[in-house]
Every structure is written in C-alpha cells, then in structure tokens.
Amino acid sequence: MAANVVSDHVSATIPASTSVPSFVSTTAAYEALSSYKGLISVAVVVFTILALEQAVYRAKKGSLPGSPWTIPIIGKFMDSMNPTIEGYISQWNQGPLSALSVFHIFIVMASSNEYTRKIFNSPTYAEPFLVASAPEILEPDNWVFLTGKLHADYRRGLNSLFTRKAISTYLAIQDRVTRAHFARWLADSKAEHEDIMNKIRDLNMETSLRVFCGSRIPQPAVMEITEQYWLITLALQLVNFPLSIPGTNVYNAKQCRKRAMKHLTEAARLSKVAMAAGETPECLVDEWVTLMRAQDENSKGKTDFSDHEIAQVVLSFLFASQDAMSSGTIYLFQHFADFPEIMAKVLEEHDKIRPDPSVPLTLEQMDQMPYLMAVVKESLRLKPPVTMVPYKTTRAFPISETYTVPAGTMLIPSIYPSVHDPEVYPQPEKLIPERWLDPESPANKNPKNYLIFGSGPHKCIGQEYAMLHMANTIVTAAATMQWDHKRTPDSDNVQIIATLFPKDGCLLRFKPKAAAV
Ligand code: HEM
C-alpha cells in the first residue's frame, strides 16, 4: 500500500515530455526511490549511533574538562598511535581530572598528585589494567592479574625475594654480567657514536635472567630470550591490534612467551633439583626454593609454587622491569655524559669507598654513596620511565565531591606531573641531585610526590633492587670506562616505546679508562 502511494507520487513527478515509456519510468523511479529510502534508513541508523556515542560520552564525562565531543568511532585513536609527551602534557593541563575516548573506551586521566595517589590506593574501586593484550602475552592465570586478598597473599610470598639480604647477593651477579657487557662494548667500539638502546636492553635482560635464574638457564636460552623479548615490548603499546593471529604483534609476543616459559620452567625444575641435593643457592629462584623448603604450614602467604608458577613470576618480573630499567639506565648514561661535573662528584665519592674498581661493590658500600643514589633518584624523576599506569574502575568511583568515575572506565593515574611539580621540585626540568641531599628540601619533605614506582597495594615490588642495579651499573661504568655523547636536536626530546627514551636513541662512544682495570 505504502509502495503504491510512493510510486503514484513519483510517476506524477516524471516530466510528460519524457520519451521513456511510462511503465519503465515508473519502475525505475520506484527503484531509485527505494534505494534512496534505503540510504536514508542507513543514514538514520548511523546518525542515531553517532548521536548515541556522543550522548554516552558526554554523560560519562559530566563536568570534567576534555573535548566536549569525541571524534566519531575512533576518538583520540590517532593520538594514541603516536603518543608524545607534549600530547600528554596538553591533556594533563586540562585539569586534575580530564576525559577522552579512544574507540569507545571512555578514559579519565588524573594529573594531580592527590587524584593519582587516590587511584593507586583505592583497590576497592580500581585495579591495574595492563594493556588489553596482556593476558594473552603473560597467560591469564599469571599472578599479576590477581586482585584483592588473593593478590596480597600471593605477593606476600614474593616479598622475601627482595629483602636487603637477598638484594645484597644479587649485586655480585649484576657486577659480573655488567662488566662482561662493558668489555664487549669496548671491544666493539667504533670511531662513530652509536645508538645505545639495544646495548642497554641486552645488558638489562642478561642481568635480570642471571639474577633470577643463575646458571640454571643455559647461555643459548639467555640469548634467545634477549633477542626475542623486543616482540613482547612491541605488543605492550597501549594501542595494538587485539587479536592473536599470525603476523600481529600480540601473536608474535605470545610465541616469544611460550619459548621463554619453556626455558624458565626448566630453570625452576633444575633449581629444585639442585637445592634438594644441598647445593648453595646462587640466584633468586634458588633462594626462593630454599625458603619454600624451609617453610611450614604456619608460614604467611603462598609457599607451594610449582615450576610453572615460578616461571610465570620470573616472566612477570622481566615484563615489569625490562623496559623501565632500560629507560632509566639509558638516561643515566646520557646524564653522566651531559653533566661531567655530576659524574666527577659521583666518582669522587666512589673512589673513597671503592679504591679498586675491579672489586664488586657490596650493599654496605652502596649505602655509603648518598650522592650516587641522589643522582639515580633525580635522573628517574627528570625522565620517569613509567609516565602513567592504566587502571580500570571495578565499580562507580566517587573520586571527588563533584565527579564519580563510572564503573568500567579506564582510569589513568599519571606519574609525570607529580614528579615535575615546581612547588616540590623547583626548576623541575633541571637535573639537580642536591635536592635529595638536604633533609629540609621540598623534595624530601614531600615524599608522596615521588611516584616513580607507584603507590599502594601494587607498588613496584622491585623498587630497591632496580635502584641498586642502576646505581651499580652506572658507577661501575664511570669507574672503568669513558664515554662521550653526540648531542643532536632530538637528544632532549622523548620517544615513548612503552617507557620514555631519548628520541635519538642516545648516541655514545665508549673508550677504556686509562687507569681502569
Ligand atoms: C626503573 C625501574 C622500574 C620502574 C620505574 C618501575 C615502576 C613500576 C610501576 C610504576 C609500577 C606500578 C605500580 C602501581 O600500580 O602502583 C610497577 C609495578 C611492578 N613492578 Fe616495577 N618498576 C621498575 C623495575 C622493576 C623491577 C626490577 C621489577 C622486578 C624485579 C619490577 C616488578 C614489578 C612488579 C611485579 C609490579 C606489579 C606489582 C603488583 O601488581 O603487585 N619492577 N613498577
């Protein structure tokens, strides 16, 4: 019926002079109108969806600053493909909380210290939300995905791996591995300056694997994991094709994880055999197995870790540390070269404590080098490896008096603004290690701003180990080698590959030190 009405109307509008027979023109017009009508219907549906998208975004955004509209469908996808620190700063400058959306994922970013800390410390409302592909990469039952009491209990079982006593035994391993890498850097040193990104990544990976697994993991396995780990870093970018199909970053990372897990599980098995045979513990896994053997049912936390679980924990440590440690170490090398007066002061302090640089440093000696530790702390502050940590709300989160973050929102506490706050760190863009030496300085009076390692129940478990590893690496490098930095217009610019790196990769040239052993 309706069709007739339309066709009558259309035929009436066909000019009488047309040479086309009227029944043909009527049918053609009818078809044209039908497809026109179809197009209109599609347009109405699309328009409704887009309007709904804007309405949902605006409803969730509420009073928060941020674009009043979201770019249809993709939101700020293009920005997240190529993140820049300038882009983040402009988002943070919008307010202590601001909104954006990427592919319908509603995101609230916190820039103030107050809100950032509140997110880190509100486990009943928000939990860490690594990248969407993380469960594929690490396996969904990896302990890093646990929450609440389960997480706390599991983590308690791991705390013994990072006590001062444990860390002091790792220093000698770190020393041995880093010196072997320095020797190779010197042997391979060319006339031109070279990008040190890969050198540092390799050094950190081998150090970590030897600290965690000692000789329980054979050298070819160390090399295989070191060579392939980059595949995991690539899959960790905030935006990635989410499915694991051949050729995608997530698929490649998964294959890399499978190979790494095979080696790490075997290392755990060998460690259990060696400890049962009464061998002396020589690495983190050995210490852990020894502790497990000594624990009884009254011990707190989880104590019965299988080979697979041990391997998963080691993998989680690699996952959490490799990029951040590489970022922190690269900037230390760059800062030591760019500020020779700071390097000279570190060496002056060091030479009194360790006159013979061929001997590994002990933890007690590290304790006697406050200036060195201040430089490491300040270098991390200036270029925080982790600028923000994605969390997700598990329920509506009344974060302020005027705004409640909806359940299921990606909520991002940002570290960078807290450690660049000019009230707490005057001249925040300058490397000033001395700010950490005066107990009355605003930096020391406001420890809550130093969020480099997070805060709350998920605070970095490897913080002390990481600081000591980086301090040991840089001071031993400075005591045994010389290097100069080829500065480029990009040396102070930042590229974000999961963590922060100098945009030019940091071009250095190494030489042996005349008096170095
Ligand atoms: C410069 C080096 C490092 C930096 C800047 C860093 C930073 C961080 C940050 C910001 C977090 C999130 C904290 C939170 O959500 O509150 C974190 C978590 C974590 N980090 Fe680190 N980290 C570093 C090195 C390491 C190392 C060496 C290890 C292990 C040996 C490690 C293991 C972990 C683990 C397992 C977590 C998750 C803890 C949990 O969920 O309970 N990190 N780290």
Image (spheres, grey):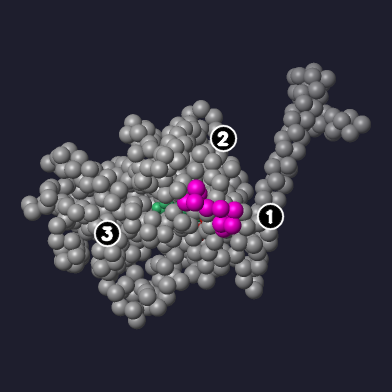
Which residue corresponds to mark 3?
362
Q: Sequence order check: which comes first, mark 1 or mark 2?
A: 1
Q: Is residue 435 left or right of residue 314?
A: left
SS at mark 1 in the image: helix
Front: mark 2 or 3: 3
Check if residue 298 falls in the magenta segment: yes
Quadrant of the image containing the N terminus:
top right
**Label 2 SS:** loop
Residue 44 appearing in the image: yes
Q: How many other residues sit within 10 Å of disc 3, few (<14), some (14-19) or many (≥20)?
A: some
Identify the residue at horizontal 19%, vertical 54% (top origin).
359
Where residue 274 appears, as percent x and y from the top left, is 41, 39
Using residue 336 as the reference point, say whether residue 392 is left or right of it: right
Q: Residues under labels 1 and 3: Cα distance? A: 58 Å
Tell me if residue 213 is in the magenta stretch: no
Q: Which residue occupies 34% across, 39% down?
A: 215
Q: Is residue 1 left or right of residue 209?
A: right
